[in-house]
Image (spheres, helix red, strand yellow):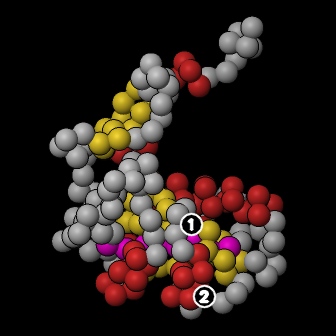
């Protein structure tokens, strides 16, 4: 698969095929890709909590909130929940700076999801979750702070990229067939050059 195909298929999925389980080995392979990525000042403060056992996955699921732009829906639908989670943690005992770590988190999360696509999987970055509840549920020590939750599974929905319309809205939406549309700005609208600034 060419890199652009990986990027195009790496969508935010909110429905997964419950028959496709994910193993600890697969999650470790994704975390292994993430650990190889660049890190600010090469401090490497990130840690990865792997959850694949059904009971723990269900417990994490309850602490997350999906699709804030679709308040009328309570996603994921029953039976379409994630098969596994990777929780990205920051070591805070010896790395306190938030901004560089957030850059690391973004790089690591995107790497995990691209590697997941290559395996025929998909995922969702979740920033809307009960942080204190997650800390308690996973029995995390105080020096490991949750930064991002990544849901993973085999996608069981259609996500379509579409061009931002005349009203300029980038808010995602769904049609009557539950197809999920994600408006993207045109290439010419996001490239800045000396010419475009005149």
Q: Is residue 71 above or below residue 80?
A: above
Residue 117 shows in this picture: no
Q: Can you identify the residue that label 1 sits on?
A: 148
Residue name at image x 66 percent, y 90 percent: 141
Residue most extreme to the front: 72
- Residue 64 is one of the magenta-drawn residues: no
- Toward the viewer: 35 or 61? 61
2 and 1 marks in contact (CB < 8 Å): no
- Toward the viewer: 148 or 166? 166
Please provide percent x and percent y for residue 90.
68, 73
Residue name at image x 60 percent, y 88 percent: 140
Q: Which residues are magenta?
A: 83-90
Task: Name the quadrant containing residue 163.
Answer: top left
Quarter of the picture containing the C terminus is: top right
Mark sitting earlier along the chain (2/1): 2
- Considering the numbered disc 1 on the image, is that residue within a helix, a strand or a loop? strand
Q: State whether the magenta stretch is mostly helix, strand or loop.
A: strand
Q: Is residue 165 above or below residue 76?
A: above
Residue name at image x 69 percent, y 55 percent: 103
171 left or right, relative to 41: left
Please provide percent x and percent y for residue 183.
42, 33
Please provide percent x and percent y for residue 68.
45, 54
Q: Is residue 76 above or below residue 196?
A: below
Q: Give the numbered dot on residue 158.
A: none
C-alpha distance separating marks 2 and 1: 14 Å
Q: Residues within 10 Å of mark 2 (few under 14, many from 20)?
A: some
Q: Can you identify the residue that label 2 sits on?
A: 140
- Considering the numbered disc 2 on the image, is that residue within a helix, a strand or a loop? loop
- Residue 85 is one of the magenta-drawn residues: yes
Quarter of the picture containing the N terminus is: top left
195 left or right, relative to 70: right
């Amino acid at each position: 698969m060419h890199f652009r195909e990986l990027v195009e298929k790496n969508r935010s999925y909110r429905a997964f095929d419950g028959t496709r389980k994910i193993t600890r080995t697969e999650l470790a392979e994704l975390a292994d890709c993430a650990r190889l990525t660049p890190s600010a000042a090469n401090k490497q403060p990130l840690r990865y909590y792997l959850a694949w056992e059904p009971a723990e996955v269900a417990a994490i699921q309850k602490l997350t909130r999906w699709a804030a732009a679709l308040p009328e829906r309570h996603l994921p639908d029953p039976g379409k929940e994630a098969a596994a989670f990777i929780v990205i943690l920051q070591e805070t005992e010896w790395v306190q700076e938030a901004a560089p770590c957030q850059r690391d988190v973004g790089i690591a999360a995107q790497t995990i999801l691209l590697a997941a696509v290559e395996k025929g999987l998909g995922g969702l970055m979740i920033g809307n979750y009960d942080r204190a509840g997650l800390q308690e549920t996973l029995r995390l020590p105080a020096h490991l702070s949750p930064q991002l939750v990544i849901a993973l599974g085999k996608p069981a929905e259609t996500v379509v990229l579409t061009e931002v319309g005349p009203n300029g809205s980038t808010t995602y939406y769904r049609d009557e067939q539950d197809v999920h549309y994600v408006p993207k700005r045109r290439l010419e609208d996001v490239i800045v050059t000396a010419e475009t600034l005149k």
